[in-house]
Image (tube, rainbow, N blue to C red):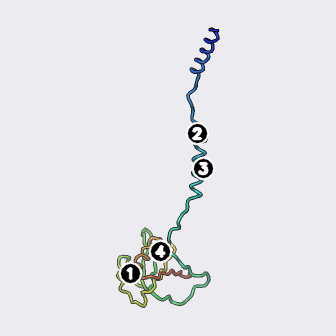
């Protein structure tokens, strides 16, 4: 009987010595992370960013009538230049001087600013003109397209 007890004791001792350290399975953790990711993607709502409302002219032949209000024509930039030349009602004007000119413009013309730009003009320059016009008190801003010749 004593031999049987010793055999059990030695068998338990080998089992204790052979016990491997516990391992952590990563598969359930990855599943939980993906489920959380899907949950947050589905439940998140995005608010639309306020933008600039633009009314584009209808397609077809351009109208020949002269637009009412102030007209800023922006030509393509010269090679090596960043900004194009700006003409306000036919006169060359710098962006730094535009605020004063728009502020002191005739009230009949000051109700609307029409921006007419060529294809290579940077949007940055157009937005700067729009900001200057808004700061000068012009509420209506329109865009015109030059007819191709």
**Dot 3: what SS?**
helix
List the residue tagged with mark 4: 76
Separation of marks 3 and 2 at Cα, in angstroms: 14 Å
Q: What is the crowding at mark 1: few (fewer than 14 residues within 10 Å), some, or many (at least 20)?
A: some
Give the mark toward the camera: 4 or 1.
1
Separation of marks 2 and 4 at Cα, in angstroms: 59 Å
Earlier in the chain: of badge 1 and badge 2, it is: 2
List the residue tagged with mark 2: 26
**Dot 1: what SS?**
loop
Earlier in the chain: of badge 3 and badge 2, it is: 2
Give the mark toward the camera: 1 or 2.
2
Separation of marks 4 and 3 at Cα, in angstroms: 52 Å
Separation of marks 1 and 3 at Cα, in angstroms: 53 Å
Q: Is residue 33 left or right of residue 87?
A: right
List the residue tagged with mark 3: 35
**Labels 4 and 1 touching (C-beta < 8 A):** no
Instruction: Residue 81 in the image: state x and y as whole percent.
Output: 42, 70
């Amino acid at each position: 009987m004593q031999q049987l007890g010793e055999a059990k004791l030695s068998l338990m001792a080998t089992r204790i010595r052979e016990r491997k350290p516990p391992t952590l399975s990563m598969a359930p953790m990855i599943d939980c992370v993906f489920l959380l990711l899907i949950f947050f993607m589905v439940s998140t709502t995005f608010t639309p960013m306020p933008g600039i409302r633009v009314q584009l002219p209808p397609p077809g032949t351009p109208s020949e009538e002269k637009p009412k209000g102030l007209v800023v024509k922006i030509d393509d930039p010269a090679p090596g230049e960043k900004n194009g030349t700006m003409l306000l009602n036919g006169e060359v004007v710098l962006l730094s001087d535009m605020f004063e000119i728009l502020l002191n413009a005739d009230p009949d013309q000051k109700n609307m600013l029409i921006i007419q730009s060529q294809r290579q003009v940077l949007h940055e320059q157009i937005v700067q003109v729009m900001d200057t016009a808004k700061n000068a008190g012009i509420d209506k801003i329109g865009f015109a397209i030059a007819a191709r010749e």
